Amino acid sequence: MNVKEGLEEIRGRLIRNGANPKSLQVVDAIMQRASLPAAQSASAGSLTQMVRMLMRSPVANADPIVYNDFVKVEEELETRTEEFRAQREAEDAKPIPKTKKFYKAQKEKS
């Protein structure tokens, strides 16, 4: 995932959650760095990873309100991930088809 796109998504989530302006400033500052030509190819594994990096920023460490804003976004992302995994597991839990032997035995019984 492209870092700039991920930060835009995180910023949108912060706005929807009514985050503190300082939280948005942290994201904006990093987005500004990600906009530089040298950082265009930067990528991150997931949004959760990016939020955790933001949680370790000096501003988040110094201000519990900013830190809590990022924790809320992380919690939303983890909940969404768990729901997606549960849905995928439910889809993968298809019934196992019966063998020819089963149908042959059933036919012989009747």
Image (tube, rainbow, N blue to C red):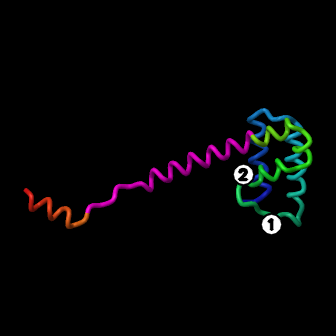
Taking the image as shown, residue 61 lies to the left or right of residue 102, namely: right
Q: Which mark is residue 41?
A: 1
Three-letter amino acid code at the position of disc 2: Thr
Residue 92 magenta: yes
The answer to whether residue 36 is above or below residue 13 is: below
| Earlier residue among tags 1 and 2 | 1
Within 10 Å of the Cα at label 1, are there few (<14), some (14-19), or many (20+) other Cα atoms? few
Residue 75 magenta: yes
Residue placed under numbered mark 2 in the picture: 48
Residue lying furthest top: 18
Classified by dominant secondary structure, the portion drawn in magenta counts as: helix
Within 10 Å of the Cα at label 2, are there few (<14), some (14-19), or many (20+) other Cα atoms? many
Looking at the rendered structure, the secondary structure element under dot 1 is: loop
Rendered location of residue 38, percent (x, y): 88, 66
- Foreground tag (1 vs 2): 2
Q: Quadrant of the N terminus?
A: bottom right
Q: Quadrant of the C terminus?
A: bottom left
Residue closest to the eye, 56 or 8: 56
**Total number of numbered discs in the rendering:** 2
Q: What whole-number distance in Å separates the C-alpha atoms at marks 1 and 2? A: 19 Å
Question: What residue is shown at x 14% (from left), y 63% (from top)?
Answer: 105
Rendered location of residue 21, percent (x, y): 87, 36
Rendered location of residue 33, percent (x, y): 90, 57
Looking at the rendered structure, the secondary structure element under dot 2 is: helix
Question: What residue is shown at x 71% (from left), y 60% (from top)?
Answer: 45
Residue closest to the eye, 30 or 84: 84
Per the rendered image, the range of residues in magenta is: 72-98
Taking the image as shown, residue 14 lies to the left or right of residue 96, namely: right
Question: What residue is shown at x 83% (from left), y 64% (from top)?
Answer: 40
Rendered location of residue 106, percent (x, y): 14, 59
Three-letter amino acid code at the position of disc 1: Ser
Question: What residue is shown at x 89% (from left), y 44% (from top)?
Answer: 61
